[in-house]
Image (tube, grey):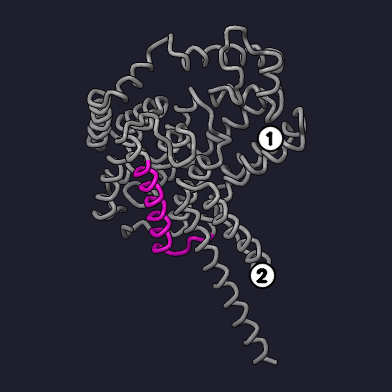
């Protein structure tokens, strides 16, 4: 009898290890495709997620994740669930809630729960950087050949801009180095920071330019009392972006539209915001419901002066949440991001100079940049962008759980 139990225990352990290995492979594929392929990243995520469910059934595990953050997520998704049922078309809204809001969060839990060694953490980060490098290369190729609104493969240009608001702050933290980052990784981050900035210039995402500049200045100001190099590096990056604007005619023309009130994208946004204020006045507390913006805006609130007759979002992340989910939904949204910023700030301070602290600094700075960019655009429901956001937060939680704070990756 004892021999049989030993054999069963061996098979049980073998199955658990095999599933863990399969989950890691899925996460590797997900990270490798994260910036360049929606379908590839989705398939990697589905593989890892499915195996994680099987793994939990065979051998239940406990996720070590901040309770405040979990509370913020639960409140936010509860509000979204109610709002999806209140929308004009509940079934499509529930589908959007699942595919566009809920699934992108899954990488956070998978990385926090199944990255079990420093080597695995390093592999995931390396795959993410390779994915970003491929995206950079595609945009640089198009930019060199005269496309000053270059996009990554078939994705809209603003998708790369949104991703860059998260990626560039992370590369900046890596380029600044520290005890938790080896010299080799620092050199990689410096090189990729340059290529990503040039790619972003060719991409022409104006909101991302401004958001990243503001976030880096904020980082430099926060770090000034203990490390003045951060502020100098932030100013250097802004200077490099200025040189790109001066010496690349297409980029210079694009940058000139930032302050041009007659530029169509500028005044059309203002018209959309005015319509949003009217919608908020009519639906202040609960909003119009998820995925109802386009239909209600175009049928009842679009202004006669508007030339763009189709708008699927409010071109402002805060206004859009307020329009679709009302004051209650915006409060839940702000509480969620308060928890993310609070968690990342506290851990960045607690693990200052160590790898978990640096990864949480990436999360903090990337979140600030993301929210800055959200003042003039809306990409909170863009899966490829939000999966990348939650991937970075998952890496930070994984690093903390591993306590890999003494040796650089």
From the viewer's side, name the closer residue of 366 and 6: 366
Looking at the rendered structure, the secondary structure element under dot 2 is helix
Instruction: Find the residue positioned furthest to the front.
Output: 145
Residue 125 among magenta residues: yes
Residue 228, picture quadrant: top left
Counting the numbered discs, the total is 2
**CA gap, disc 1 and disc 2:** 32 Å
Residue 344, picture quadrant: top left
Few, some or many C-alpha atoms within 10 Å of disc 1 (few <14, some 14-19, many ≥20)?
many
Residue position marked by numbered label 2 in the rendering: 58
281 relative to 312, above or below? above
Main secondary structure along the magenta-highlighted residues:
helix
Identify which residue is drawn at 37% across, 25% down. 210
Looking at the rendered structure, the secondary structure element under dot 1 is helix
Q: Is 203 situated left or right of 193 in this image?
A: right
Identify which residue is drawn at 44% across, 50% down. 396
Give the percent coordinates (x, y) of residue 323: 64, 22
Evaluate whether residue 225 shows in this view.
no
Give the percent coordinates (x, y) of residue 118: 40, 62
Q: Is 9 situated left or right of 354 in this image?
A: right
Few, some or many C-alpha atoms within 10 Å of disc 2 (few <14, some 14-19, many ≥20)?
some
Instruction: Find the residue positioned furthest to the top.
Output: 304
Give the percent coordinates (x, y) of residue 208: 40, 29
Q: Quadrant of the C terminus?
A: bottom left
User: Which of pointers 1 and 2 lies earlier in the amino acid sequence?
Assistant: 2
Q: Is 66 situated left or right of 199 in this image?
A: right
Residue position marked by numbered label 1 in the rendering: 80
Identify which residue is drawn at 65% across, 65% down. 54
Residue 229, picture quadrant: top left
181 relative to 57, above or below? above
Identify which residue is drawn at 43% across, 64% down. 117
Residue span colored magenta: 114-138
């Amino acid at each position: 009898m004892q021999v049989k139990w030993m054999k069963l225990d061996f098979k049980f352990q073998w199955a658990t290890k095999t599933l863990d290995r399969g989950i890691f492979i899925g996460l590797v594929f997900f990270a490798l495709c994260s910036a360049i392929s929606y379908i590839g990243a989705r398939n990697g995520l589905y593989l890892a997620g499915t195996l994680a469910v099987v793994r939990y059934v065979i051998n239940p595990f406990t996720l070590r994740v901040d309770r405040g953050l979990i509370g913020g997520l639960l409140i936010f998704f509860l509000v979204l669930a109610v709002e999806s049922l209140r929308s004009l078309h509940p079934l499509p809204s529930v589908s959007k809630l699942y595919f566009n809001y809920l699934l992108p969060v899954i990488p956070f839990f998978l990385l926090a729960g199944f990255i079990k060694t420093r080597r695995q953490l390093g592999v995931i980060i390396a795959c993410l950087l390779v994915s970003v490098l491929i995206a950079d290369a595609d945009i640089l190729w198009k930019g060199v050949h005269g496309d000053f609104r270059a996009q990554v493969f078939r994705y809209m240009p603003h998708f790369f801009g949104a991703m860059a608001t998260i990626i560039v702050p992370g590369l900046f933290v890596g380029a600044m180095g520290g005890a938790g980052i080896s010299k080799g990784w620092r050199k990689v981050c410096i090189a990729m920071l340059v290529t990503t900035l040039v790619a972003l210039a060719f991409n022409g995402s104006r909101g991302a330019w401004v958001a990243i500049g503001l976030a880096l200045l904020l980082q430099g100001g926060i770090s000034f009392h203990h490390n003045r190099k951060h502020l100098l590096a932030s100013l250097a990056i802004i200077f490099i972006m200025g040189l790109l604007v001066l010496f690349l005619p297409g980029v210079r023309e694009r940058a000139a539209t930032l302050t041009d009130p007659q530029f169509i994208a500028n005044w059309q946004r203002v018209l959309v915001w005015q319509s949003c204020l009217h919608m908020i006045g009519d639906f202040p507390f609960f909003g119009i419901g998820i995925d109802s913006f386009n239909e209600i805006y175009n049928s009842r609130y679009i202004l006669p002066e508007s030339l763009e007759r189709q708008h699927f979002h409010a071109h402002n992340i805060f206004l859009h949440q307020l329009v679709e989910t009302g004051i209650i939904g915006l409060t839940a949204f702000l509480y969620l991001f308060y928890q993310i910023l609070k968690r990342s700030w506290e851990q960045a301070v607690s693990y200052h100079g160590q790898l978990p602290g640096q990864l949480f600094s990436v999360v903090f700075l990337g979140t600030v940049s993301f929210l800055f960019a959200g003042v003039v655009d809306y990409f909170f429901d863009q899966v490829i962008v939000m999966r990348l956001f939650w991937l970075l937060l998952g890496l930070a939680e994984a690093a903390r759980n591993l306590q890999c704070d003494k040796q650089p990756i």
